């Protein structure tokens, strides 16, 4: 350690460098050798901040020590010399702030500060000229800078670890030319008392605080005629004091601008809030999103060998997405790549609070682990706010206000208090309120994981999981009762609760849950599955509950079977057809005529595809006799659909078109445009049966455009598959393949994909790929046989043409071989045969 032969004085303190002694009021102070070395290093370099790493090299050369050793000595020095003597400069280290009043012989210890460069003189500041690269915040920095030009006080508000401080540093550095009298950074994180805020501001500006005048008054006098920018960082725990200081300074200094970072706004009249969101996440290798760029940069700092490649970009994007695009979490995660690898890190994200630790030495202590950052935010909440925060953690993907009230309210916190507390959590950046006519409240996934930890620590998990499931039942039951009258908007809103429904069912089916309750819950959830076109998932979940518990009432059993029939009405599942018949039987005994009509309608739809023509005719006849004259339009339209499906399977395409047009008229009269388009989609199919391919293509094209424009929850896949069929029948190879390929992901969520592949088989048979056509036909035949599906006449005509063309080209023996090979294909393999663009000879199922 370099020493000098001089002593120096500041206030009542005398530092004898030669004797390595510190005197306060003439009395020796008890100070360790390392602490004295820290003080000497800071005093000698008092013209600038000294980074923590530099202090480690100066005081502990060639040694590896824990960061808290330095913090202990800094704390000891502040306790002896006063907290204002050594300032923390965010992101850059520490700086000695006291004025020396005794000259020394060593120029490095001179009481006269070093000459200031012209650039520095033009803009006095305590900001470091060096700051870290900011990822994905260019638009944010520009927006905040523009707000500062028109508003006296701007607050960057966001969750802990979202990147508020770094954005503020970037903005402040960029604004130096504009604020000729100075840009000053005031770090408030370490303060625990609001009374200290004014002193911290004074010290940042280099103002000597006297006993005869309040610090804020002195600062106000200094800034009164200055054009300056003051940055108050980390205000959330000192909101009242920070707000009062800001109000007072702005009142006395009209040219002053104040930039604040906080988890909550100051709520003063002069304030303009800028809410900072997460970093964007994307998987593209050529133009990776900011979150991915940040991850790679921080990971490479720990392990320079890491490169962003096609092999790891999806995994890295998933990590960033699961961490909500939160910069702090991403940086902590990236630091673990050297030990875990990208895939190992992705696999362990469920343990995120154990994995994401170990921030850099320059990082605030509360940001050195993810849990510490969230604990800091949680600790600022009132007990009631903490209760609501941890309870809304049971929701997956957010919730409505009513659902939050149902779950979070209790004897101590009533429903209206929950409303206010949700608002507080939004203000404190712990809860997101998605903008909509009816806002949804949601926790970021990292926040949600933390909330669930707190819920478990409070011993509330079992109670709240049950309450969550009960709230979902209370939400869905009225929707199910009004199933035919619900608006499209209401159906879409119901669809928003899909993840909550899944979570509630998972609890109900667990050992801690109630299987009878699970049956009741899924029975009234058809609108949710249909809104997402996730019909197959809903059916499989319900079938897994069989046999039903003996405690299930006849009413719930009837509703359960009707649920299966409702979701399967576009398919051919025999167990769902039997469920529709069972529902009809139960509703007859329960004398529930409207529900009996529903069961009969769906029995007719499914039964027609299974060839149960006698039962279909009986079901349609009974439904027509029972349906009320003033029945809801959608129920009457569903009856028209059941008749159209029956006519299609009878080969009576003219009558099928008439019934589908009746369906469209009923929807149109009720103002349901989505229903109109679904009905016209059916008309397009039946026009194909009539051989009117041009008319079908024109109609289906307009239907598809309309469904896309209205962002329809489902129907787009059906329209594309029918359009593929019309093009195939007209002989348009490329259009048929393009629409068929695009329809697949939609169809897979709703029904069996096999019937749609018959269209593609016809395309291949007509365009020189007979081996592929034969293989696909084998797959389709096998799928039909397993399901017990009976092809309707138009399908049989297509099948006959495929057989004739393939046998003529391949010969009977090879045709049979390809047919058998196709029957053994998986769905994935069949799709590859259908749509892979490699040569036909490479894609026959038996190649």
Image (cartoon, helix red, strand yellow):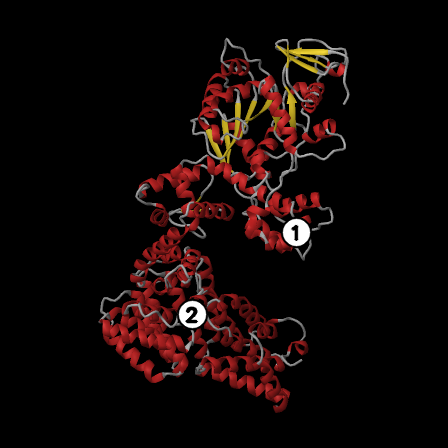
Please provide percent x and percent y for residue 114.
72, 16
Count of numbered circles in the view: 2
Q: Secondary structure at mark 1?
A: helix
Q: Position of residue 210 (x, y in %)?
A: 54, 10
Return the x and y of residue 479 as percentages of the image width and height.
32, 59
Q: Nearer the viewer, residue 291 or 203?
A: 203
Q: Is residue 68 something one can see in this rendering? A: yes
Q: Residue at label 2? A: 544
SS for dot 2 = loop
Q: CA distance from mark 1 to mark 2?
A: 38 Å
- Label 1 crowd (10 A; few <14 / some 14-19 / many >=20): some
Q: Which residue is mark 1?
A: 340
Q: Quadrant of residue 496?
A: bottom left
* Residue beneath the point at 58% across and 18% down: 82
Quarter of the picture holding the C terminus? bottom right
Residue 158 visible from this viewpoint: no
Question: Are the two marked residues, 1 and 2, in contact with CB atoms closer than 8 angstroms?
Answer: no
* Quarter of the image where one finds residue 525: bottom left
């Amino acid at each position: 350690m370099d020493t000098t032969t001089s002593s120096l004085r500041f206030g009542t303190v005398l530092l004898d460098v030669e004797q390595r002694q510190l005197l306060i009021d003439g009395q020796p102070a008890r100070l360790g050798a390392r602490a004295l070395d820290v003080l000497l290093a800071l005093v000698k370099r008092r013209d600038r901040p000294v980074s923590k790493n530099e202090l480690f090299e100066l005081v502990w050369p060639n040694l590896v020590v824990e960061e808290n050793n330095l913090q202990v000595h800094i704390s000891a020095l502040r306790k002896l010399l006063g907290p204002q003597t050594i300032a923390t400069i965010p992101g850059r280290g520490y700086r000695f702030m006291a004025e020396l009043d005794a000259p020394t012989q060593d120029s490095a210890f001179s009481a006269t500060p070093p000459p200031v460069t012209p650039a520095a003189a033009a803009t006095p500041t305590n900001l470091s000229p060096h700051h870290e690269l900011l990822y994905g915040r260019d638009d944010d920095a520009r927006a905040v800078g523009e707000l500062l030009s028109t508003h006296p006080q701007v607050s960057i508000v966001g969750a802990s670890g979202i990147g508020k401080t770094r954005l503020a540093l970037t903005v402040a550095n960029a604004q130096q030319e504009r604020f000729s009298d100075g840009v000053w950074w005031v770090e408030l994180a370490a303060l625990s008392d609001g009374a200290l805020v004014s002193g911290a501001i004074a010290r940042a500006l280099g103002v000597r605080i006297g006993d005869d005048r309040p610090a804020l008054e002195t600062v106000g006098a200094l800034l009164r005629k200055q054009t300056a920018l003051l940055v108050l960082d980390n205000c959330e725990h000192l909101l009242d004091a920070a707000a009062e200081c800001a109000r007072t300074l702005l009142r006395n200094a009209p040219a002053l601008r104040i930039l604040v970072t906080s988890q909550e706004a100051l709520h003063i009249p002069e304030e303009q809030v800028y809410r900072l969101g997460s970093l964007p996440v994307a998987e593209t290798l050529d133009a990776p999103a900011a979150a991915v760029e940040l991850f790679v940069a921080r990971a490479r700092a720990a392990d320079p060998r890491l490169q962003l490649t096609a092999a790891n970009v999806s995994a890295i994007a998933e990590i960033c997405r699961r961490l909500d695009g939160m910069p702090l979490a991403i940086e902590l995660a990236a630091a673990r790549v050297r030990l875990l690898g990208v895939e190992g890190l992705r696999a362990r994200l469920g343990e995120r609070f154990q994995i994401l630790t170990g921030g850099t030495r320059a990082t605030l202590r509360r940001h050195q682990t993810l849990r510490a950052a969230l604990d800091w935010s949680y600790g600022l909440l009132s007990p009631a706010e903490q209760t609501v925060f941890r309870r809304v953690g049971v929701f997956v993907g957010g919730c409505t206000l009513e659902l939050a009230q149902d779950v979070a309210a209790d004897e101590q916190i009533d429903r209206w208090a929950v409303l206010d507390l949700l608002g507080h959590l939004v203000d404190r950046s712990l809860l997101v309120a998605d903008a909509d006519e009816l806002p949804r409240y949601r926790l970021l996934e990292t926040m949600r994981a933390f909330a669930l930890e707190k819920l478990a620590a409070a011993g509330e998990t079992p109670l709240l999981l049950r309450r969550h499931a009960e709230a979902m039942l209370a939400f869905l039951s009225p929707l199910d009762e009004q199933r035919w009258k619900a608006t499209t908007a209401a159906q879409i809103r119901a669809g928003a609760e899909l993840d909550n429904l899944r979570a509630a069912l998972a609890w109900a089916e667990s050992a801690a849950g109630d299987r009878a309750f699970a049956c009741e819950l899924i029975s009234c959830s058809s609108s949710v599955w249909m809104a997402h076109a996730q019909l197959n998932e809903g059916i499989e979940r319900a079938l897994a509950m069989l046999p039903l518990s003996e405690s299930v009432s006849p009413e719930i059993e009837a509703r359960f079977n009707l649920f299966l029939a409702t979701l399967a009405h576009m398919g051919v599942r025999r167990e769902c057809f039997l469920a529709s018949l069972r529902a009809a039987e139960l509703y007859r005994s329960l004398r529930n005529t409207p529900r009996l009509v529903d069961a009969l309608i769906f029995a007719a739809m499914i039964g027609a595809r299974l060839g149960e023509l006698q039962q279909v005719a009986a079901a349609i006849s009974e439904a027509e006799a029972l349906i009320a004259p003033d029945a809801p339009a959608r129920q009457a339209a569903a009856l028209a659909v059941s008749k159209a499906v029956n006519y299609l399977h009878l080969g009576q395409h003219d009558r099928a078109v008439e019934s589908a047009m009746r369906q469209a008229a009923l929807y149109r009269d009720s103002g349901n445009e989505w229903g109109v388009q679904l009905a016209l989609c059916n008309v397009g199919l039946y026009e194909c049966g009539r051989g009117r391919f041009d008319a079908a293509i024109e109609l289906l094209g307009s239907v598809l455009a309309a469904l896309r424009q209205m962002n329809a929850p489902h129907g787009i896949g059906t329209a594309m598959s029918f359009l593929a069929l019309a093009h195939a029948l007209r002989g348009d190879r490329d259009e048929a393949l393009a629409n068929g390929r695009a329809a697949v992901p939609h169809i897979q969520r709703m029904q069996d994909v096999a019937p749609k592949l018959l269209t593609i088989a016809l395309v291949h048979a007509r365009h020189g790929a007979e081996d592929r056509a034969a293989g696909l036909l084998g797959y389709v035949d096998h799928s039909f046989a397993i399901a017990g599906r009976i092809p309707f006449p138009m399908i049989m005509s297509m099948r006959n043409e495929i057989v004739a063309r393939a046998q003529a080209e391949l010969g009977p023996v090879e045709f049979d071989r390809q047919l058998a090979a196709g029957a053994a294909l998986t769905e994935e393999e069949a799709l590859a045969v259908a749509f892979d663009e490699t040569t036909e000879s490479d894609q026959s199922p038996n190649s």
